Image (cartoon, rainbow, N blue to C red):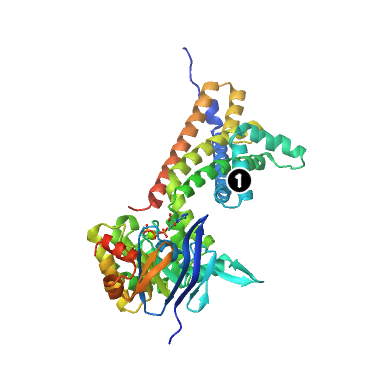
Amino acid sequence: MADPLLVIENLHKKFDHLEVLRGVDLRMNGGDVVSIIGSSGSGKTTLLRCVNLLEDFHEGRIVVDGQEIGYAVKGGRRVRLPNSIVARHRALTGMAFQTFNLFPHLSALGNVTLGLIRVRGMKKDEAVAIAERWLDRVGLLERRNHYPGQLSGGQQQRVAIARAIAMNPKLMLFDEVTSALDPELVNEVLNVIKDLARDGMTMLIVTHEMKFAYEVSTRIIFMNEGRIGEEGPPSEVFNNPKTPRLAEFLKNSSF
Amino acid sequence: MDYRFNFDAVWRSFDLLLAGLGLGLGLAVISIFLGSLIGLVAAFAMISRNSLLRGIAVVYVTAIRNTPILVLIFFTFFALPQMGVRLGKVESFVVTLTIYAGAYLTEVFRGGLMALPRGLREAGLAIGMTEWRTNFWVIIPVMIRNVLPALSNNFISLFKDTSLAAAIAVPELTFYARQINVNSFRVIETWMVASLMYVAACYVIAAGLRRIERKLAIPR
Ligand SMILES: Nc1ncnc2c1ncn2[C@@H]1O[C@H](COP(=O)(O)OP(=O)(O)OP(=O)(O)O)[C@@H](O)[C@H]1O
Ligand SMILES: [Mg+2]
């Protein structure tokens, strides 16, 4: 069997004294689409942010594509790696945020090319060609010269996804990418993600869109109080919850 | 009032006034440029997690902002030489105005940095940029655009502050105006012309800055 693309082992994360992640273990293979569901405050966002090293964590390890990220053991002590290496590890994963977070002073094209030029070191022409291909893929090629302030929420989120994917990450992370959108704009974004799934992109998705999670995922993870409460294929998890907590959660969410 | 205006003496020395205005503009541009660099660094120090850096920046900004600029000018010009730092009067003034500008611009930039959404920095990091690159390509460009109107106001007032250089005999506009006043006794005429020159210069600077603001504004 192929080496796993993502391995999370015994991940613990505290904010001061509040332990938000209490030992999470997770494995993903290339091409897996894993959706994380769970109630508010269960630690879904925090988990993704740890994988993208936007949060530091106190215990456990995360391995992406064979590389342990963020930390190393030196002289018997666990140390956070220097910023330049952390930046390189971060580039192994791409992240799409709930609030898009586009660079407002750059056009759609500029948003996608910035990382290609400044991180990947590409020439401008090459970066533009790649950026245009991805903007086309998310249906926004004609808007490439528009600025974020001139785009709808759904369009901004699609640019943000193009910006992340153009960097050619091993793993894409999506954190509730549709929850800041008006209902009529949700599908255009979900369709982009489904399209990426068909292409074999490995994705870890936090979502409250249960129908979407059911359709797109190879596996569902139910987070509960900082741990993985239950996991399995969508049909199992949605139709046969084994724990009362999951049954309760599913009953309260629209599906 | 039975006063006959006579501008002859002023016009005869108008080239001096113009040269003075030019020097004032030059002093302002250099000080604003260097002050902006200091302000940027100090603003990042102010929001840094390192309490030593934060402390240094706070002391700097607080000390400078609570001292009258004329006192700072005299301090640099009269007191520093006693401590072994000898500067010409023009250099001395540039140093003072730079440090003064830096303190005010620190506050402008700090406000700008604090007003940015947290997600902006994270988006830069998430595509694999280092903190430095994120600051350089995202945080600073966005922040500067947001604070441009406040910057313009500061630039204009710093330009006007160059008139205080006359106090240490830097030959700028106010200095020459006083000289012409003393030599010709055309008090009203001299100061009228000098004031109008300041007004005109400020007007032109403001118009130029507004153009830049419009050009750099983030499109919506
Ligand atoms: N920066 C922070 N400082 C302190 N506590 C935090 C911070 N970020 C998150 N938390 C806390 O950690 C817990 C988990 O938060 P997290 O955002 O991971 O939840 P979530 O599962 O994504 O919830 P939601 O569905 O509402 O997005 C919450 O109790 C939250 O208040
Ligand atoms: Mg969340």
Q: Which one is in front, A43 or B170?
A: A43
Regarding residue A145, the answer to whether it shows in the image is no
Q: Say which amino acid is labelled 1.
A: Ala
Taking A170 as reference, is A40 above or below it?
A: above
Taking the image in four quarters, ligand 1 sits in the one at bottom left
Residue B75 shown left or right of residue B7 in the figure: right
Q: Which one is in front, B104 or A179?
A: A179
The residue furthest top is B1
Q: Which residue corresponds to mark 1?
A: B57
The residue positioned 44% from the left and 78% from the top of the image is: A5
Regarding residue A92, the answer to whether it shows in the image is yes
Q: Position of residue B194 (x, y in %)?
A: 52, 30
Residue B83 shown left or right of residue A141 in the figure: right
Q: How many marks?
A: 1
Circle 1 SS class:
helix
The residue furthest left is A184
- Label 1 crowd (10 A; few <14 / some 14-19 / many >=20): many
The residue positioned 49% from the left and 68% from the top of the image is: A11
Q: Position of residue B39 (x, y in %)?
A: 56, 47
Q: Position of residue A126 (x, y in %)?
A: 41, 74
**Quarter location, residue A255:** bottom left
Q: Which one is in front, A165 or A128?
A: A165
**Quarter location, residue B78:** top right
**Quarter location, residue A170:** bottom left
Residue A47 shown left or right of residue B94 in the figure: left
Residue A36 shown left or right of residue B7 in the figure: left
Q: Position of residue B85 (x, y in %)?
A: 74, 43
The chain letter under disc 1 is B
